[in-house]
Image: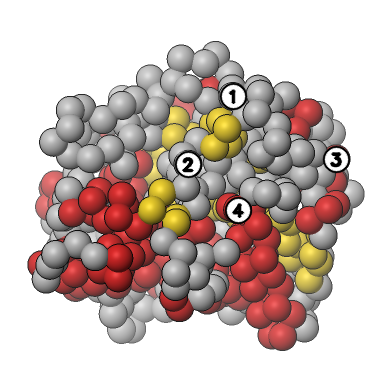
Amino acid sequence: MESADDDRFSFNGIDASSGRPLVPDLPAAALARLARGLPVDTDAIELHELRASQPFVTAEDVDPRRLEEAGWAVVFAHDADPAIREALAPLLAHRRAQASAIDDRRYREFLGPDAHRPGERKQAFLARHGVPRSGPVDPDRLPYYLLIVGDPARIPFEFQAQLDVQYAVGRLHFDRVEDYAHYARSVVLAETTHISRAGLTLFGTRHPGDRASELSSDHLIGGLHAALARTRSRCPLALVPAADASKARLARLLGGPDTPALLFTAGHGVGFPADDPRQRDHQGALLCQDWPGPTWSRPIPQDFYFAGDDLAHDADLRGLVAFFFACFGGGTPQQDAFHPRGQGPPPLLAAQPFVARLASQLLAHPRGGALAVIAHVDRSWASAFHGGRSGPEVEVFTSAIKRMIDGHPVGYAMEYFGSRHAELSADLALALDEDSEPGLAHDRELADLWTTSSHARTYLVLGDPAVRVTTNNAARA
């Protein structure tokens, strides 16, 4: 556990090729040096935009919970295969009927010359379409809910993060055209036939001697359970004890008989070197309690983790929203974002950026896919929920989950993470402006701000951001 006199930061993630941590525990001084080498994260979001966007989401007279007011749009890559748009046609028609009920401008398709262009950043995309770069969202200019359709090698993760400051953004990318059709059919069926499931399930591992999983089990899973048990009496809440968080148990929650409306998992995501042939299929898979812990210092077999190809052929994932706290659970960027500037080019994490296979296979299961997967791109660490001297900080997770359970759109619920990133980034900029001689207290502050800000930015929604959790007991907005 991190404490006032413990300056270590614990990273999530296990290298499945060696059985060792993806990143060892680092002292605050080391992370502070990285923070001092990154004075402004201009590749992600400009700080003046963060400060401007923090107090509001949509214009005052627009209810972000109502699609006919907030609007919905799809953004394709410039070279998108027309067959992808055709495969998504049922979902697009469904959203058009909902979003254009008041005004036709609140449904948009950005295709062909209007699509995202190679290398285009948020500011250029918005300017090209006559949209202000900051301020409250005006859905008559650009709808609030945006679905990006494209490979992150064509439409970068960074572009999604930039848009996500103001808008509720999701992404779809599949290797096969038919998977877009599977997903579209699953969403339309879930919403038109009112598929619902029972409640929320928390699933977290805790491996002896493994500090990262001890922190996530005790503070993230434990903190969420305590907070939600007090306030969500209308929604069934289940906690899987860490000792029972096995691969077999997870299979029952991912398309098996115990599949809930909302599944939250916390633990290690597995990672692989860029040249490992298993990386594309298994990076971001969820390490289960079957792993003995740090005493296992050799390659990790698939028996210990749950990957996309572990999904049963007859799995039924309809109506599920999954939220994974795990390294690479949502995807992997091409370059290491935590390499100090000025020390040569950053090492490659992957040959190309990619969406995690487990997440994409959950969404595109032929028998019925999940509605959305919320997960992390890149690595994650305990400071995302454990704020050093201030102790556990799970309110942003709790608030987002409460909003989902109340039937609000998933993209709107994730605004809590965008607001947290905005606040922390502004605080980080101020701390760097006032940077003085390094010392443990100041190093700890910089390390806290830098890691938590970066972490909040790299959550993403995979799937349509307008989908909603529908439980048997949830109140709808």
Res. 222 in view: yes
Q: Earlier in the sequence, mark 2 or mark 4?
A: 2
- Amino acid type indicated by mark 4: Arg
In which quadrant will I find the N terminus?
bottom right
Image position of 436 (left or right of 154): left
Numbered disc 2: secondary structure: loop
Residue under numbered circle 1: 18
> Of the numbered discs in the image, which one, if any, rests on residue 160?
none
- Amino acid type indicated by mark 2: Pro
Residue under numbered circle 4: 211
Labels 3, 4: front one = 4
Numbered disc 4: secondary structure: helix
Q: Earlier in the sequence, mark 3 or mark 4?
A: 4
Q: Earlier in the sequence, mark 4 or mark 1?
A: 1
Residue under numbered circle 3: 248
Numbered disc 1: secondary structure: loop
Measured Cα–Cα span from mark 3 to mark 4: 24 Å
Front residue of 338 and 469: 338
Residue under numbered circle 2: 24
Front residue of 196 and 251: 251
Q: Earlier in the sequence, mark 1 or mark 3?
A: 1
Q: Earlier in the sequence, mark 2 or mark 1?
A: 1
Image position of 102 (left or right of 126): right
- Amino acid type indicated by mark 3: Ala
Q: Position of residue 125 (x, y in %)?
A: 19, 47
Labels 1, 3: front one = 1
Labels 3, 2: front one = 2
Q: Are marks 1 and 3 in contact (CB under 8 Å)?
A: no
In which quadrant will I find the C terminus?
bottom right
Q: Position of residue 250 (x, y in %)?
A: 79, 45
Measured Cα–Cα span from mark 2 to mark 4: 11 Å
